[in-house]
Structures are given as C-alpha cells and as structure tokens.
Amino acid sequence: MNTKQNVPYRAMILAAGLGTRLRPITYTIPKALVKTNGRTLLEGAIRHLADYGVKEIIINVHHFADKIISYLDQNKNFGLDISISDESDHLLDTGGGLKKVSGFFTDGRPFFVRNVDIISDLNLRHLMEYHIQSQAIATVVVRKRETSRYFLFDHDHRLCGWTNLRTGERILSFEPSGDPGMLAFSGIQVLNPEIFSLITENGKFSLTSLYIRLAKYHLIKGYLDTESIWKDAGSLPVESVQ
C-alpha cells in the first residue's frame, strides 16, 4: 500500500439517501442541504474532511440531485476539487454507490468514506494512522451508544459479524473466541482501494453486507471513538437551507 506523505487523501461523501428520518423537510430538499446550527450537513462534512487535508472528494447524489449540484456551484465547491456520482436514475445504496466510483480512487492510497448526515469532529489523522498500522482492508469507526443495529467484534476489534436487536437477526462472518462485543457504527470509515477487486456484488447493496461477507477472510477493524463530538442529524433540530 502506498503511504507516501504530503499527498492529500481522497474521500467520498455518501449523500444519495432519501432522508426519510428528516421528513417533512426532505420532501422538498435533499438531506445533504438540511441545516443544523446554521450550516448544511454537506458543508459540515466537506469542511471536516478538508480540515485534515482532503483535497479531492466525490459525492453521490440521487434525491434532488440538481439542488446539491447547484449548491456546490454556488459555493465554488468550497475551494476543493469535487466530483459528482449521479445516481438519479437508480439509488445504489452505500455499497453499490462505492462500487460505482471505483475509478475515482486510483492513486493506491487508502481513502475516507463519510456519511453526510452525521456531525463529527473525529481526528481523521489518528484514524488513518490506526488503519495503516493495522493493515486492515477497511476500518469502521464505532462508538458505545444505544441503537438497534450493531457490528460485532472479537477481542482484537476485528469485525466478526452484525446483529439487529429489534428483529433478532444475527450474522457471523466467523466464530470468535468468547462473546463478541457490540459497537455502533459512526458513519465514518477508511478503505483500501484493493477492496474494489473483492466486490462481486452488483446493483444495489450495502457496505454492511459487503463487510460481513469479506470479514471471513479479510481483516476489517473497528476504531473505537470515545472522545470526539458525534451527533446523528436525525436526532437534532434542523431547518431547510435558505
């Protein structure tokens, strides 16, 4: 893996979702343009990445895609090199959306993937250092918080499964020694571009299902975040972009 210094990392912002948890606001605008504390979720995500040296970002769009593109044009892409992956015709979910942009990540370096609808000041430099040192193919940021769906990890923070407490569904990639720990996904991750050669899924699929399949034979790590600010936009007071 190429770990050359002084070369900006690239990133993807996942912004194509319908924003159902933010309705009724998202009946007229995409969730990326919902405001909280006077700033759109998209601007917050972009600035978080830019604060850690990311210069090139690709954003997938679907719901009111034209409004996101217009917003970026009006703000001159916030001074960054921003590309658009248009899923207007067919929403691909997180995994399918990532597969569609494989040609964007051709520099051999690990890259960030970030959900647009979370607010976080996570130290991305520390996350990247952890990812590189662990030699994982993917690293997912997780927290101890209440939710219904959890990733499962062994004692070394290796991903070994997933569970939904509400439905009782539980999937194990492999049997860990001892009971697996349950941690909630924080919407931020780092991936190696080698992962694209392992994706056999087509069309619409989630990154979660991809990770659970790959974790049997490939190292996917959890990065436990205990210090950063973290908020889910679905639980915050929000307003429409003006």
Image: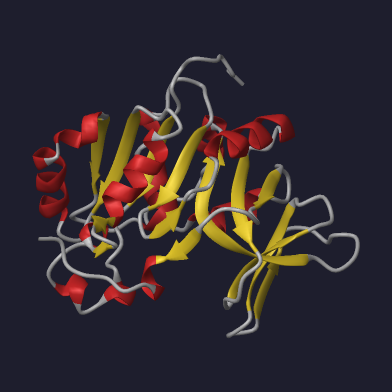
Residue 93 appears in which quarter of the rendering? Answer: bottom left
Q: Residue at x 57, y 61 (%)?
A: 185
Q: Residue 188 location, x and y as percent? A: 50, 50
Residue 1 appears in which quarter of the rendering? Answer: top right
Q: Residue 92 location, x and y as percent? A: 34, 55
Q: Is residue 100 visible?
A: no
Quarter of the image that includes the C terminus: bottom left
Q: Residue at x 25, y 55 (%)?
A: 39
Q: Residue at x 52, y 43 (%)?
A: 199
- Say above or below: 5 vs 124: above
User: On the rendered structure, is 5 left or right of 41?
Assistant: right
Q: Residue 80 location, x and y as percent? A: 26, 29
Q: Residue furthest front?
A: 37
Closer to the camera in the image, 180 or 23: 23
Q: Residue at x 27, y 67 (%)?
A: 18
Q: Residue 153 location, x and y as percent? A: 75, 59
